[in-house]
Amino acid sequence: MASRRIDPKVKESYSAVRYVQVEGLALMKIAKHCHEECASDVIIAQGALLGLVVEDRLEITNCFAFPKSVDESINDEKYQLDMMKSLRQVNVDHYHVGWYQSSDVGNFLSLPLLESQFHYQTSIEESVVLIFDAPKTNRGFLSLSAYRLTPQALTMFKENDFLPDTLKSLKVGYDNLLVKVPVVIKNSTLTNILLSELSFKIKVEEGSEHLDIGTATVLEGQLRHLMDRVDDLNQEAIKFNRYQQAVVRQSTDKHRYLQKRALENQARAAKDEPPLPEEDISKIFRPLPVPARLPPMLMATQVDAYAEEIAKFSTQSLAKLYMTKAMNTNN
């Protein structure tokens, strides 16, 4: 099988953005939308990112929410075009540079997200997807991450081939589907002054909420999600092992069949009889369908994300525990 090469244009567009700069106002709008949707029955919140590319950075200066999926009366494409036209009329940045989505730890890693980001990057080279973790932010840790598809993942989706041989030739694994782009939050001078004044107005008891060490429920939820993903990944591994066993059995049966025909032809030749008619072996032993490897790869990526989040959360919890212990000792 010939090895596939990554398009140089893909590599060039991939390295065009070094980091993402998010305006504080855009971040507040994203946070407000995600918190409101997470409080309702909507599973995820999504929206468009607006801004421009300046040298090696992607500046996100504005955003707007996508209509809810339950509202079938709204055409998504027409809605986005109307929003961008309206923003242009009031002299606001209206260039589409990506999209955002709410998340709870690693549940954003899914096939729809990868397909959406593929369409974004093929139409808008510098586009990114911002992932906002509302539950983690509620616990006092701002969680905002930017992701882009790697050149290998772009080539894989472009060829629309997720078989093991293709993934092996492209060197695509669970750890290089997406690349994390650094995020920088920028506020104006007046905004920084306002935040400084607000920090002095926060009561001591409200500020100490971030030292809450009651993390058992959060850690339990993350461990349950991790166990579910590990079970799903184990089921996929069992399916692939069964496929490999079936291939070995078919290869053995095919070899025996060919040997049997060869012996029969030798016996017929000894009797001066014509050999057996030629047969299409592929029709007798049809190739077994190869299971797609993208779903288990996504599950492995989710397992890695949950494990990393549990490790970080445990470290933060231990730090809180030692800080609380030191404060109680001093008192």
Image (spheres, helix red, strand yellow):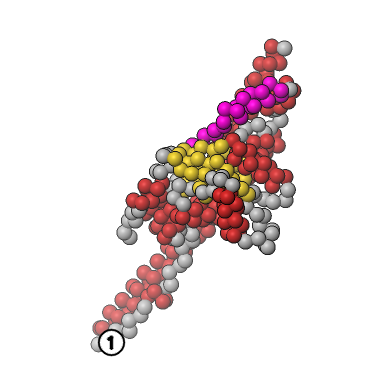
On the picture, is 269 further left or further right than 101?
left
Relative to the observer, which residue lies in front, 209 or 107?
209
Where does the magenta region start and end?
181-202
Q: Amino acid at mark 1?
A: Pro
Q: Is residue 192 magenta?
A: yes
Residue 89: percent from the left, percent from the top?
57, 50
Q: Which image quarter is the N terminus in?
A: bottom left
Instruction: Please say whether residue 163 is one of the residues in the magenta stretch.
Output: no
**Residue neighbourhood size for the residue with mark 1, other residues' Cα within 10 Å, grouped as few (<14), some (14–19), many (≥20):** few
**Is residue 144 toward the left or the right of residue 15 in the image?**
right
Q: Tell me where residue 257 appears, x and y as whole percent.
A: 38, 74
In the rendered image, residue 190, in percent from the top left (x then y), is placed at: 60, 28
Q: Nearer the viewer, residue 87 or 322?
A: 87
For disc 1, the marked residue is: 274
Residue in the image at 57% along x and 53% along y: 85
Name the residue at 65% across, 20% down: 323
Q: Quadrant of residue 38?
A: top right
